[in-house]
Amino acid sequence: MYNNFALLYDELMDDVDYKNWHLYIEKTFDKFNKKPKTVLEMACGTGNLSYYLAKRGYDLTCFDISSEMLSIAYNKINSFKNVKLLNQNMIDFNLNKKFDAIISACDSINYIIDKDDLLNVFKNVKDHLNKDGIFIFDINSYYKLKHIIGNNTFVEDRDKIYYIWQNYFNSSNNIVEFYLTFFVANENKNYIRFDEEHFQKAYYIDEIIELLKIASFSEIHCFDAFTFNSLREESERIYFVALD
């Protein structure tokens, strides 16, 4: 997952406003009267959100399963003395430490395509939270994965990158298969091709809530992303807040 693509990730995600994403998380802390000092960011990727969390001054631990993504994140946040960067998996991470807040951003949860594995993620989060801790995460909605992304093909031609993104939605298991083909220009203006395959699970909101309850979270809230508004039928990104 995210091998060669890691080198292109930031360029292709340049339309994502991570600064405002971080500010929304700060607003979520305020809404639920939380003032965390220790924060864990799961699936931190190339460290775009981590950078803003680090600037905020939290005692921050970040991990990701992709060593390629982590190497890019390291270059962004290695100057901060309050950050620890680790290579871990959301399903079975074990840090021997508890946190005031745990965060997972940018639909990383959708990459956990087995419900039992997702339950293990939630149980693991619960075990790593301090008393009265807060867990904040988002997902691509069922609506988005099935009706906007699923069974569609997207093509983008940039200055030195051309890519084709083909998607297939499997209605029997609600898993979307992403097939990405990249053509990237090198220094000699020749194009190098590489392919990647990714999978995301389209979860119903009730499925997520049920698993959080099984993992012993006492209070669960859902919001239309980057607001505190109720969900709409066509909400594309859903934010969850689970309280210890």
Image (tube, grey):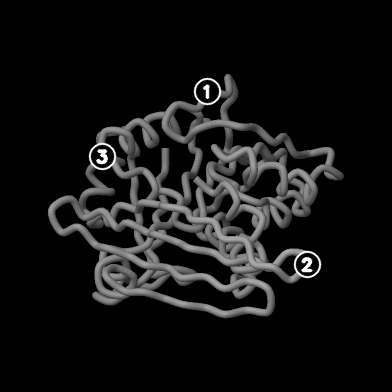
Amino acid under disc 2: Asn
Indicate which disc residue 188 carries.
2
Residue occupying the far top of the picture: 96
Is label 3 in contact with label 2 (beta carbons under 8 Å)? no
Q: Is 203 rendered above or below residue 228?
A: above
Give the residue number, with chain letter if any, for mark 1: 94
Q: CA distance from mark 2 to mark 1?
A: 45 Å
Q: Is residue 159 left or right of residue 214?
A: right
Element assignment for label 2: loop
Choose the circle earlier in sequence order: 3 or 2.
Answer: 3
Give the mark nearest the N terminus, 1 or 3. 1
Q: Secondary structure at mark 3?
A: helix
Residue 152: quarter of image: bottom left
Q: Residue furthest right?
A: 79
In this rendering, the answer to whether 87 lies above or below 68 is above
For the residues marked 1 and 3, what is the alpha-carbon distance in whole angstroms?
Answer: 20 Å
Left-right relation of 223 to 129: left
Left or right: residue 11 versus residue 228 is right
Q: Which residue is tagged 3?
A: 115
Q: Which quarter of the figure is the C terminus placed in?
A: top left
Quarter location, residue 36: top right
- Which residue shows up at 72% across the image and 38% down it? 59
